[in-house]
């Protein structure tokens, strides 16, 4: 039998509430929760919160195909350091995750990862927006989220068919959309507005995102499909989703840490570390995204962790690829910018995203018999992001020099202490 | 001043200092031997990722008249085509021992990126739609030469402002000197937001023509038609072209500028381009002197009063006859002269 482990002296916090208790982990499961418990090994949780591990619905692990930027393993190490015990890997790899074979490949790579890795599947073959991908075959392997992320599905009728088909699958799946009207966004490298005008960089208007949000809400109403709006960035999108949810539609939606903190003014340096898609928007949009998260309209915080090598970012703004790192900083940014109790932040980063994709091993209450996917957070810790402070193979951190609040001390994934005292154990 | 990247970063004092220096170098350029030793031993590289023979020749002529050595690195003959990153290209150029790099690139901000990686001075030779500082300065110089001080002077910048680095440079350089700028274009050719721009806007050229001291025309790219930004060249010309009929409404002292190359018959009628009020050739001539002033300011004249610099340029033109200017000490690659005469 494996070594038993106790998280000692912490406050346990999950969807059921909060209490002071030690948590014993044996053989991948929570064995006991209570006072004065002991085990072979003790991890100090004094002054910390013991919570279900965080769940990220939007991570780019770059494998297969772009291993120089990230691998499933290096990405999962970032995730564990950020308190995540599960990530959903986006399908814009090379080849795209658009078949049972590639799903299996990523699942195999995930077996040695430092957290659970759940591949998502593409909606269309090669994410080309032309032919539906075999969603049923992928769903049979456990895929529960489908997206062409990186681009939105442009063809209105094809998107309708994808939704109709998804409704008929024997599994409960969600169709996630990178909402970007390709014609309206074409050629844009940042938000279209005051800063794009000053800098002379082609922009993407608010309407490029909002046009597709509006279309997909209409199609979801038509088809009854469950949809998930990825990385919402505009005040108009937040308002439309609030209205759709109020009308009873099954729509969930993400906010990223960077869209809750950074504005398009960051691009004034022309540094492509601030190039991301959807782009950093106005201060009013940042406020609306934060307010949407606080109100629960945006019910999920997802990282859109998007590693890119230094080489590809050592280019002019127009030519560099969009994307920024996020897994290790998401909780710190969320706690720094959101006027919410910790439990509410954890709801949006753990049990709610787990529910969106039906991950029963994740986000559940901290009680005996449950799988031991846990994170131990020091909510009072304040830390400044240093350059290169990441386990990623890439270095595109947009938060360098910023002070964040709340830091992960330990992460327990499937019973294994993968992060202890802020250090990855393998 | 270490780099010249943005016109917007130049205050009135900076612009006036550069234009006063330009005066001195215009005089140098008019000599039988138009050359001074101000930057002897310095090397200026042209790093052009976008073809612009005019701008490149203007900078190289300026560098040579200051006795600097010049190097040209153009994209067609470089390893950039083989996938080398901009950073590696910049570091390679620097390793050859240059003191200043003139960067021209089709992407906005490329010179800023280069400046963040290398120690040499970087001059923005035109980047994307963003800025073209020496063009803004030469336009300001040309206009000041014709009209005197620009305070209150009314300038209409007409045409495709949205995609024009010249327009952005002109707005900042001219308003820094007190000019009042009106942008004239259909909304499709204006930037999406003008928040923070010190300008007025009109969509009606005829409404502003009666009230201007200068009309600065911008080049109209033909691809703007295919992008549906204007219905046709013919309609553009009829609404925003400086036709002969519109030119007749301009007073005798009104200045007409164009950064070239011109589309005669589109943004400017052929006879208007050849009108004495058009200063298009002056702009080119002044461009060399402005670039001399900029290179001198960056490489030869840090902390040196303009009067001294003017004095320096006023010496005999033969190379070697005048003393080197004091070096800034920033570049260790060229040896210091044993004795540096002052003044
Ligand atoms: Zn996306």
Image: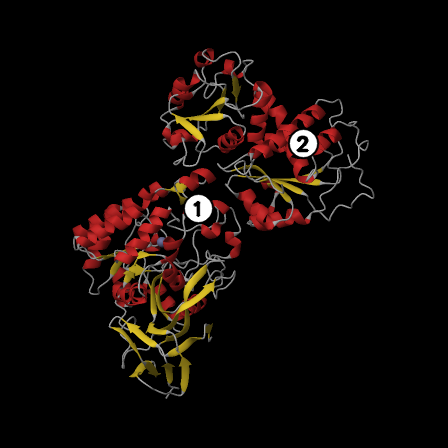
* Mark 2 neighbour class, 10 Å CA radius: few under 14, some 14 to 19, many 20 or more: many
Chain letter belonging to callout 1:
A
Residue at image position (39%, 75%) is A47
Residue B109 place in picture, x, y as percent: 52, 43
Residue B222 image point, x, y percent: 44, 28
Rendered view: A92 above or below B209: below
Q: Is residue A154 visible?
A: no
Indicate the colouring scheme: secondary structure
Vertical order, A321 against B123 (above or below): below
**Image location of residue A27, percent across then percent down:** 34, 83
**Above/below status of A157 relative to A105:** above
Q: State the quadrant of the N terminus of chain B.
A: top right
In this figure, which residue is indicated by the disc labeled 2?
A: B62
Residue nearest the viewer, comparing B161 with B173: B173
Residue A337 as seen in the image, left or right of residue A174: right
State which quadrant residue B138 falls in.
top right
Using the image, tell me which numbered label, if any, was put on residue A265. 1
- Whereabouts is ligand 1, in terms of quadrant? bottom left
In 3D space, how far apart are the residues under numbered discs 1 and 2 (Cα atoms)?
36 Å
Q: How many marks?
A: 2
Nearest the viewer among A255 and B199 is B199
Chain under numbered label 2: B
Residue A409: x and y in percent read 42, 73
Could you say whether the residue bearing mark 1 is in a helix, strand or loop? helix
Disc 1: CA contacts within 10 A as few (<14), some (14-19) or many (>=20): some
Q: Is mark 2 within 8 Å of ligand 1?
A: no
Q: Nearer the viewer, residue B96 or B206?
A: B206
Q: Quadrant of the C terminus of chain B?
A: top right
Badge 2 marks a residue whose secondary structure is helix
């Amino acid at each position: 039998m494996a070594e038993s482990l106790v998280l000692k002296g912490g406050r346990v916090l999950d969807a059921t509430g909060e209490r002071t208790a030690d948590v014993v982990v044996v053989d991948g499961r929570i064995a006991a929760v209570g006072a004065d418990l002991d085990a072979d090994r003790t991890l100090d949780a004094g002054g910390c919160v013991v919570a279900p591990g965080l769940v990220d619905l939007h991570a780019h692990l770059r494998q297969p195909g772009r291993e120089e930027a990230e691998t499933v393993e290096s990405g999962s190490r970032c995730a564990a350091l950020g308190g995540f015990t599960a990530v959903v890997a986006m399908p814009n790899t090379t080849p795209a995750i658009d078949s049972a074979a590639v799903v299996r490949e990523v699942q195999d790579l995930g077996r040695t990862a430092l957290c659970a890795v759940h591949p998502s599947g593409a909606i269309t073959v090669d994410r080309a927006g032309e032919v539906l991908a075999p969603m049923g075959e992928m769903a049979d392997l456990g895929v529960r989220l489908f997206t062409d992320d990186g681009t939105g599905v442009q063809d209105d009728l094809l998107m309708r068919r994808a939704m109709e088909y998804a409704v008929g699958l024997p599994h409960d799946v969600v169709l996630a959309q990178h909402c970007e009207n390709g014609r309206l966004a074409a050629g844009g490298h940042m938000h279209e507005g005051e800063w794009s005008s000053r800098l002379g960089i082609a922009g993407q208007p608010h309407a490029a995102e909002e046009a597709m949000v509006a279309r997909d809400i209409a199609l979801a109403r038509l088809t009854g499909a469950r949809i998930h709006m990825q990385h919402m960035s505009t005040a108009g999108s937040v308002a439309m989703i609030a209205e759709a949810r109020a009308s009873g539609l099954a729509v969930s939606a993400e906010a990223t840490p960077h869209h809750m903190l950074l504005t398009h003014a960051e691009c004034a340096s022309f540094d492509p570390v601030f190039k991301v898609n959807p782009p950093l928007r106005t201060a009013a949009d940042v406020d609306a995204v934060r307010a949407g998260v606080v109100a629960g309209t945006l019910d999920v915080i997802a990282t859109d962790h998007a590693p890119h090598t230094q080489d590809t970012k050592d280019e002019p703004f127009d030519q560099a690829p969009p994307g920024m790192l996020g897994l290790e900083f998401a909780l710190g940014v969320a706690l720094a910018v959101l006027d919410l109790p910790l439990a509410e932040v954890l709801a949006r980063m753990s049990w709610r995203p787990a529910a969106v994709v039906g991950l029963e091993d994740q986000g559940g209450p901290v009680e005996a018999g449950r799988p031991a996917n846990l994170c131990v957070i020091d909510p009072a810790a304040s830390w400044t992001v240093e350059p290169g402070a990441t386990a990623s193979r890439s270095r595109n951190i947009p938060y360098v020099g910023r002070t964040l609040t709340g830091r992960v001390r330990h992460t327990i994934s499937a019973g294994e202490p993968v992060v202890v005292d802020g250090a990855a154990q393998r | 001043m270490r780099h010249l990247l943005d016109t917007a970063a130049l205050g009135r004092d900076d612009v006036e200092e550069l234009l006063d220096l330009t005066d001195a170098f215009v005089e140098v350029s008019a000599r039988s031997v138009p050359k001074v030793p101000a930057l002897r031993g310095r090397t200026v590289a042209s790093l052009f990722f976008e073809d612009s023979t005019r701008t490149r020749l203007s900078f190289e002529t300026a560098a040579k008249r200051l006795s600097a050595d010049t190097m040209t690195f153009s994209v067609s003959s470089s390893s950039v085509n083989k996938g080398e990153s901009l950073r590696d290209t910049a570091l390679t150029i620097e390793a050859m021992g240059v003191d200043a790099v003139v960067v021209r690139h089709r992407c906005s901000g490329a010179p800023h990126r280069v400046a963040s990686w290398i120690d040499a001075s970087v001059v923005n030779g035109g980047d994307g739609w963003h800025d073209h500082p020496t063009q803004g300065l030469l336009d300001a110089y040309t206009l000041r030469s014709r009209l005197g001080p620009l305070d209150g002077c009314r300038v209409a910048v007409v045409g495709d402002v949205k995609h024009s680095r010249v327009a952005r440079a002109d707005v900042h350089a001219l308003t820094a000197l007190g000019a009042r700028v009106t942008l004239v274009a259909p909304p499709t050719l204006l930037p999406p937001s003008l928040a923070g721009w010190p300008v007025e806007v009109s969509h009606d050229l005829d409404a502003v023509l009666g009230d201007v001291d200068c009309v600065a025309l911008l080049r109209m790219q033909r691809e703007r038609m295919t992008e549906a930004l204007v219905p046709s060249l013919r309609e553009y010309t009829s609404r925003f072209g400086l036709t002969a009929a519109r030119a007749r409404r301009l007073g005798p002292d009104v200045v007409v500028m164009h950064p070239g190359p011109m589309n005669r018959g589109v943004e400017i009628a052929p006879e208007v381009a050849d009108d004495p009020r058009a200063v298009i050739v002056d702009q080119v001539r002044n461009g060399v002197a402005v670039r001399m002033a900029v290179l001198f300011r960056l490489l030869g004249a840090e902390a040196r009063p303009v009067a001294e610099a003017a004095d320096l340029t006023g010496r005999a033109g033969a190379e070697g006859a005048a003393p080197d200017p004091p070096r800034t000490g920033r570049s260790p690659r060229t040896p210091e002269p044993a004795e540096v005469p002052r003044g």
